Amino acid sequence: MALVLPFLLLFGLLFLMNRGEKKKRAALESKLKRGDRVITRSGIKGKLIEVSDSTVKVEIAPGVNVMMVKTAVEGLDTSDPGPAPKGGGKHGKGGVKGKSDSDANKGAKGSKGADADRDSEEDESGKEKKKRKWF
């Protein structure tokens, strides 16, 4: 009997926690309507185009619609959708402020790149020698 009591308490706790979560999920699913901005469990943000009993159609990009089950909707997206930046990022095409693409891709050792220190090492006399690669 003493071993059964902790299991019953654990089972009761899990049951009560799931009941509250089910109520929240049902409330969310019932208030979904066309035009709402949502975020899915996989992290995709979009706008609801169609809502049926068990499925929704989400527009994730202009002309790209995805059909998914209602339970995949995590919640309403409260962030500002705003326009996407032009040129691929915050600082334009290169992505690194004040540097071109070729400068941004170079490592600390100039044009050799950041991997150059793994491919070679210096001996006692200061001369650079190549490491062996075993693959």
Image (cartoon, helix red, strand yellow):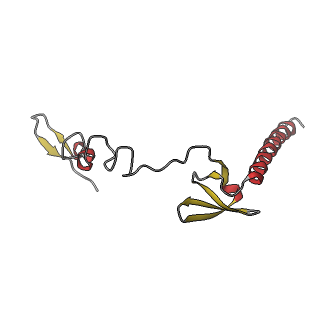
- Looking at the rendering, in which quadrant would you find the N terminus? top right
The vertical placement of 22 against 48, above or below, is: above
- Image x and y of residue 108, in percent: 23, 39
Q: In which quarter of the image is residue 114?
A: top left
- Image x and y of residue 107, in percent: 25, 43
Q: Between residues 134 and 51, which one lies in front from this camera angle?
A: 51
The vertical placement of 62 against 9, above or below, is: below
Residue occupying image coordinates x 14% and y 37%: 123
- Image x and y of residue 4, in percent: 86, 40
Q: In this view, does 25 lie to the left or right of 112?
A: right
Residue occupying image coordinates x 10% and y 39%: 127
Residue occupying image coordinates x 84% and y 37%: 9
Numbered circles on residues, count:
0
Please indicate, yes or no, whether residue 89 appears anywhere in the rendered image. Answer: yes
Q: In this view, does 63 lie to the left or right of 16?
A: left
Please indicate, yes or no, whether residue 40 appears anywhere in the rendered image. Answer: no
Q: Between residues 55 and 135, which one lies in front from this camera angle?
A: 55
- Image x and y of residue 66, in percent: 60, 64
